[in-house]
Image (cartoon, rainbow, N blue to C red):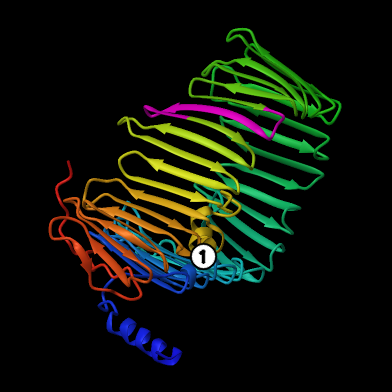
Amino acid sequence: MSVLRRLALALAVALGSCAAPDAEMHLAPLISRHTAPDYQHAEALGGLLEYHREDDDILWALKPLMWREVFGDGRVRAGLLAGLGLYEYDPDRPRTYARLFPLWSYRSEVRADGVRDNDWSLLFWLIAGGSSSDGLEDYFWFFPFVGTGRDFLTYDEFSFFLFPLYLENHKEERHSTHWLWPLFGKVRGSEVGWHAFPFYGETEVTGKYRRKYILWPFWTQAENNLDRKHPQNAWMLWPFYGRTTQDDYLAQTILAPIFGWAKRPSSGYSSWGIWPLIKMEEGGRNEERKLSRVLPFWLHYENEQTEYTSVLWPFFWHRTDQFNNMEREGHYFVPLFMNMTTTRDDGRKQRHLRIWPFTSYRFDQGRRELLRVFDLGIPILLEPDNLSRSFGWLYEVWVRHARSVPEPIPVKEKRAWFNLYHEVEAGGHQRWSMPIIGGRWTEPDGTVHSSWLFGLIRTRSGEDGGLEAPAFPGPGWPDIHRLAPVEQP
């Protein structure tokens, strides 16, 4: 038989043995599709394109351009342009948030009092506005030309014109006006005062405090807590000497802020330090606490709820917290290592382990488990989950994910780089496969299906076992994502 006839025969056999359109295939990194009860996963080009579904939670992605995740409870999260764009919707609040950094942001939510509040911004908040359903929080600004705003920083309301030429702000019953901010200003209402910075300034709240400065920061003076039995008096001739007294409390500083010490004999409180390297503090009236700091060699702090220690600050840390019947313990080597364990008030344990950039592991007892081998995400700087959704397909060598909640079905999934190995376990079924080589499917009753060499060799165990029909390109197992789960032992 000629070579051409053999190739033609092989092609005919392969085409005649193609799997059903909805059957599983594993041709990673080109294309793959996997199913299990209550589970579907499909991807192409090593994970560049992805569709993933567990129960009613659905994720699809075209990485790193966009991804969208819809949860069974109605929540929606989506990302655009590797995290520069973000969309979140929570129907329980209800709340909607969207952004395209740094061009645009939008937020809308219904507050606890039933009022709907909307805010939007353009170009790093240079242009921004908002409204509320009761009409009490409508605002708009075009910085630095003109505008008004509400609930910004610590202020209830502010307005400006050709900032810093003119600025007004309100906070409760306090109203202040500024010209050439922060040089000239006047305060009225619950607080009265004025300033011509840095030459002179004074402010007073009747019965609470009186404060003033002359040639700030060289001379400052304050009388605080005037409504208490023992008011506080403080003054400083910077940087030479400063003094604060209140009842038996005495604090002094020389060459501020370098040398300072304080004591309160009635509470056993004492403190001294050489800023910023050394500080020793213990005792307290309302809360016992202890602080010892000799940077960068040693740092230790403790109170009734928190205790932490740092060696060779800021690199090595150990911290424990106890609050709201919850305990948390963490070990850190910033930024390379983190191991944090939390025991919640219901006894549920949570763990977060990170060895950057080699691995990360998250465990929430009875709910979820997630392992990533090679993870570039750094909390705060590079949010790990968003980074993984956009670029994880390129660098995550191994991912293990488990949804442990008993309802609807516990799901365990493992995936190698570019999906060159895939394994899923759910509803009593267990399936694993590799491209070209093949894989194995174990049913709840112990029946084993094997598929090898592009699905051309397939077998089934058991009394009625033997060879099964080829299913190119393999493994060719049937779609079972709608299959009813078996009762777990």
The percent coordinates of residue 386 (x first, y second) are 50, 59
Quadrant hosting residue 332 = top right
Q: Amino acid at mark 1?
A: Ser
The percent coordinates of residue 478 (x first, y second) are 23, 68
Q: Residue at x 46, y 63 (%)?
A: 420
Q: Which of 385 and 105 lies nearest the eye of the viewer?
A: 385
Which residue is tagged 1?
A: 390
The percent coordinates of residue 336 (x first, y second) are 63, 42
Q: Residue at x 30, y 45 (%)?
A: 404
Magenta part mainly helix, strand or loop?
A: strand
Total number of numbered discs in the rendering? 1
Q: Which residues are magenta?
A: 311-328
Q: Residue at x 56, y 29 (%)?
A: 207
Visible in this render: residue 139? no
The percent coordinates of residue 447 (x first, y second) are 19, 54
Quadrant hosting residue 268 = top right
Q: In this picture, is 388 found above or below 306?
A: below
Q: Say whether residue 244 is magenta.
A: no
Q: In this picture, is 355 found above or below 389?
A: above
Question: Quick one: label 1, few (<14), some, or many (20+) residues within 10 Å?
Answer: many
- Is residue 88 shown left or right of residue 193? left
Visible in this render: residue 489? yes
Q: Residue at x 52, y 60 (%)?
A: 392
Q: In which quadrant will I find the C terminus? A: top left
- Is residue 421 shown left or right of residue 464? right
Quadrant hosting residue 91 = bottom left
Q: In which quadrant will I find the N terminus? A: bottom left
Q: Which of 109 and 41 lies nearest the eye of the viewer?
A: 41
